[in-house]
Image (spheres, rainbow, N blue to C red):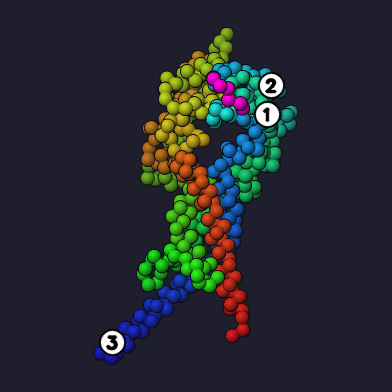
């Protein structure tokens, strides 16, 4: 009987020692990922928090271009007039590409266009038009070739958020770091679990305790409260960066069709292209409801109008998956993308960006996204201070 008791005690000791060794390994991995990938995560998180207000920031920085006076009896000029005014102010060799409707009553309409030099050096511009008067507010360069810093500030910030300004081909670095940080968050959750089994202890901060204990409690509690949200943000960000892989994985469980083909226009002798208004009228027969978001303009004789009409229940506020391709000569509908016919996999892919950006949650989503963007900073600072404190304690002479 004594031998059996002794064997049981030894078994418990071995199990406890094995568990403690495993926790030590996980803690070490959690620390390494946090110290190195976490520093990048802070910058990505802060930039992402600011980008939740990207339209407001961009308009504030460029108010003379992007904002207009709203008349007492507001009435927009026709989109054909707005496009004609913008086209008349463009260089002769400019190629109009897209007409974007005002975001709110005090915003200008935007017409983007492209110019190329003889050596095929590309310049992308935006022309801003007062939708009430049809007058040009001004224009700006949005991108010169691959020169990231030729972009407006908010677009540089967007590029930094998903590429660290290392180039589009190196965006996988951020994606890989996101996956590593998902692992770190999961390890942190395991390490957070109180050993006594009372999980509520891991959600409290003992403010009256020592500085070291307060830092430790802050790191644990903030990590526990925000873990699920951080995992979602990291996973959706990595999924968008590794988009082909994400589509391939999703297609294993649900049909995912190729990007929509809106067809090609058929030039007919003696027939002039229809206007933007006629293209919109054709699209509204398919989608009579919703908000007109933008119109992609035909850039060649075979190009088509693509009209985007946003449904009230779409999760994203800055893009739409209700688009209609229209022949630029006959006004015939050539192709339709309708989110109402999406498969489960396509709906999953549609929701990635709205969830990641906070757009899916309406106005409350933006301040919440900013809060999430600040979380990596809190975790990194408290985690670093905790790591440094323990490191100094080990170096002190006994």
Q: Quadrant of the N terminus?
A: bottom left
Q: Quadrant of the C terminus?
A: bottom right
Secondary structure type for disc 3 = helix
Up/down of 375 relative to 217, above or below: above
Give the spatial CA distance, label 3 vs label 1. 85 Å
Q: Residue at x 61, y 26 (%)?
A: 69
The residue mark sitting in front, 3 or 1, is 1
Q: Which residue, as the protein is rendered here, is positioned at the far right?
A: 118
The residue mark sitting in front, 3 or 2, is 2
Dot 2 alpha-carbon crowd within 10 angstroms: few under 14, some 14 to 19, many 20 or more: few
Residue identified by numbered label 3: 4
Task: Let me know if residue 313 appears in the view.
Answer: yes
Q: Quadrant of residue 196?
A: bottom left
In primary-sequence order, the first of circles 3 and 1 is 3
In primary-sequence order, the first of circles 2 and 1 is 2
Q: Nearer the viewer, residue 327 or 373?
A: 373
**Residue 47's x, y, as percent?**
59, 48
Q: Which residues are magenta?
A: 68-73
Residue 169 located left or right of residue 219: right
Give the spatial CA distance, label 3 vs label 2. 93 Å
Residue 72 in the magenta stretch? The answer is yes
In primary-sequence order, the first of circles 3 and 2 is 3
Residue identified by numbered label 2: 89
Residue identified by numbered label 1: 139
């Amino acid at each position: 009987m004594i031998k059996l008791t002794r064997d049981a005690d030894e078994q418990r000791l071995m199990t406890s020692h094995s568990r403690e060794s495993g926790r030590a390994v996980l803690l070490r991995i959690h620390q390494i990922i946090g110290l190195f990938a976490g520093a990048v995560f802070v910058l990505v998180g802060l930039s992402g928090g600011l980008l939740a207000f990207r339209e407001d920031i961009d308009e504030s920085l460029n108010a003379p271009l992007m904002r207009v006076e709203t008349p007492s009896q507001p009435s927009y000029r026709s989109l054909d007039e707005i496009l004609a005014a913008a086209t008349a102010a463009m260089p002769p060799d400019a190629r109009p590409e897209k007409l974007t409707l005002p975001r709110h009553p005090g915003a200008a309409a935007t017409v983007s266009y492209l110019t190329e030099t003889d050596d095929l050096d590309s310049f992308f511009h935006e022309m801003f038009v007062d939708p009430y008067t049809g007058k040009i507010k001004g224009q700006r360069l949005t991108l010169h070739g691959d020169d990231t810093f030729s972009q407006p500030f908010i677009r540089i910030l967007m590029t930094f958020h998903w590429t660290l300004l290392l180039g589009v081909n190196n965006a996988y670095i951020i994606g890989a770091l996101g996956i590593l940080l998902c692992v770190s968050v999961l390890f942190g959750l395991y390490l957070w679990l109180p050993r006594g089994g009372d999980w509520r202890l891991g959600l409290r901060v003992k403010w009256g305790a020592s500085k070291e204990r307060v830092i430790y409690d802050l790191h644990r509690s903030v990590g526990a409260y925000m873990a699920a949200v951080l995992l979602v943000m990291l996973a959706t960000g990595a999924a968008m960066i590794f988009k082909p892989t994400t589509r391939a994985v999703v297609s294993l469980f649900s049909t995912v069709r190729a990007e929509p083909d809106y067809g090609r226009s058929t030039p007919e002798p003696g027939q002039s292209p229809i206007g933007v208004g006629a293209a919109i009228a054709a699209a509204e027969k398919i989608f009579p409801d919703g908000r007109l978001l933008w119109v992609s303009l035909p850039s060649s004789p075979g190009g088509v109008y693509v009209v985007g009409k946003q449904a009230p229940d779409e999760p994203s506020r800055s893009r739409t998956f209700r688009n209609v391709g229209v022949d630029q000569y006959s006004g015939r509908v050539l192709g339709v993308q309708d989110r109402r016919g999406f498969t489960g996999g396509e709906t999953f892919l549609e929701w990635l960006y709205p969830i990641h950006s906070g757009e899916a949650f309406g106005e409350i989503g933006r301040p919440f996204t900013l809060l999430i963007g600040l979380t990596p900073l809190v975790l990194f600072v408290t985690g670093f201070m905790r790591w440094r404190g323990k490191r100094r304690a080990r170096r002190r002479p006994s």
